[in-house]
Image (spheres, rainbow, N blue to C red):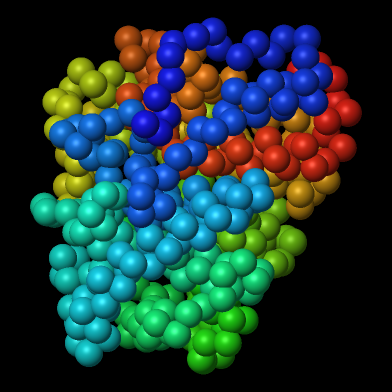
Amino acid sequence: MVGARAEGDRIRTEGLSIGELVERVAAEKKGFFAPNANGIYPAAGGLDSTSVTGYQNAWLRDNVMVAYSRLDAGDVEAAVGCVRGLMRFVESEAPRFAAVIARPSLKETVESRPRVRFDANSLRELSGNWSHAQNDALGYVLWFRARLHNLGCWRLEASEQEVIRLFIRYFEAIRYWEDPDSGAWEEGRKVNSSSVGAVLAGLEEAKLAGAAVADSLIAAGRGLLARQLPLESPKLRGADAAVLFLVYPLEVVRDSVARDLIVHLVQARLEGERGFRRYIGDSYYCQDYDRWLPPELRSSDWSERIEVRDAYLQPGCEAQWCLFDSLLSVVFGRLYKDREQQARYLHRAIRQLTPANDCPELYFLKRGRWTPGPNTPLLWAEANLSLALNEARRSPVLHFSGES
């Protein structure tokens, strides 16, 4: 079972060089990623089909992130296998794409949109309401499928060409550059830079793969980013860690000034003691979250009533997530060549591991103490740590000694 581990001692970091630390953690994580028969990964490991968290299911976005990390680790077979499974699911959603293309006003009804969350084993839709207006999730699938083609890992098959065309026509029909969506955090709808950027990355990669993508469709996305970055959604959301994904892994922000503004804003406003806040005012797993809400409501769809959950948040008590230290380690190593910051964020990411050496989704304040959330191990967090470890192995940061 993915992520199933015996309880053990937390990986010790004191007195180790970066090289020793990287190799120790990498050895502990060897063989961690195990897809199901469809090549798909659940959101979190160790859960059965009855879990009220829903994290036994699969998300398009999370699976692309895991597949990207597998490609980065040299496991092309796993990366291709995962995206093959994702494309099978997306193809089954073709009627939803087609309906919105034919009648764009349907986008206002969330349940009319293509699904972004599904049963990992059957590759079928899940029952119940969900915030499926998530353009970034669809953009990630298009981006990585086209990227695998462009890298020569898996050429686009004839049967996939229509799916690629559906993606492009869908994004044009909904006017993705001005379409309010629920974004990476699946909450209230607004025009999110992180979503527009993910779609833009997908369209540009698809064009490189030979798809017919109008220049105007790309220009519309670039124009929106020029107006909004480094903010997520001006007047509604300033600093948001999701915007960091445009810097890496999407690398869709090519202007160095805009890139610096994004990275520094995330550091200035969202970095915390144990991880990074998603955004200021985030109420998901706020202080004593498990005390206020029953298990079946903690990870449910709050997109239409976020103000109710927000009412529980005490100022400064947002959860701190375990996705971003790893990504910043890669950003500082690969893009900035800043080995000191690369090492610092890698150390922070490793310190987030639980006593069982798993990556949690987040830490939250439970009775005044930072405590790992229950959705552990989170596969997306494990994927990001893998990226940081592999980047460290490839870079001079291995020559740093001690802790930063």
At 40% from the left edge and 33% from the top edge, which residue is drawn? 2
Question: In which quadrant of the rendered view does residue 293 lie?
Answer: top left
x then y, percent, for residue 216: 52, 90
The vertical placement of 349 against 269, above or below, is above
The vertical placement of 27 against 228, above or below, is above
x then y, percent, for residue 387: 63, 43
Give the position of the C terminus as an image quadrant: top right
Q: How many marks?
A: 0
Question: In which quadrant of the rendered view does residue 61 lie?
Answer: bottom left
Relative depth, front residue between 265 and 69: 69
Give the position of the N terminus as an image quadrant: top left
Question: In which quadrant of the rendered view does residue 204 lie?
Answer: bottom right
The vertical placement of 103 against 90, above or below, is below
At 33% from the left edge and 62% from the top edge, which residue is drawn? 134
x then y, percent, for residue 361: 42, 32
Q: Is residue 275 left or right of residue 256?
A: left
Q: Is residue 270 left or right of residue 288?
A: right
x then y, percent, for residue 12: 65, 11
Relative depth, front residue between 225 and 338: 338
Relative depth, front residue between 348 and 392: 392
Relative depth, front residue between 193 and 381: 381
The vertical placement of 309 against 172, above or below, is above
**Residue 222 can be seen, yes or no:** no
**Residue 43 can be seen, yes or no:** yes
At 51% from the left edge and 78% from the top edge, which residue is drawn? 156
At 72% from the left edge and 27% from the top edge, which residue is drawn? 22
Q: Is residue 389 left or right of residue 171?
A: right
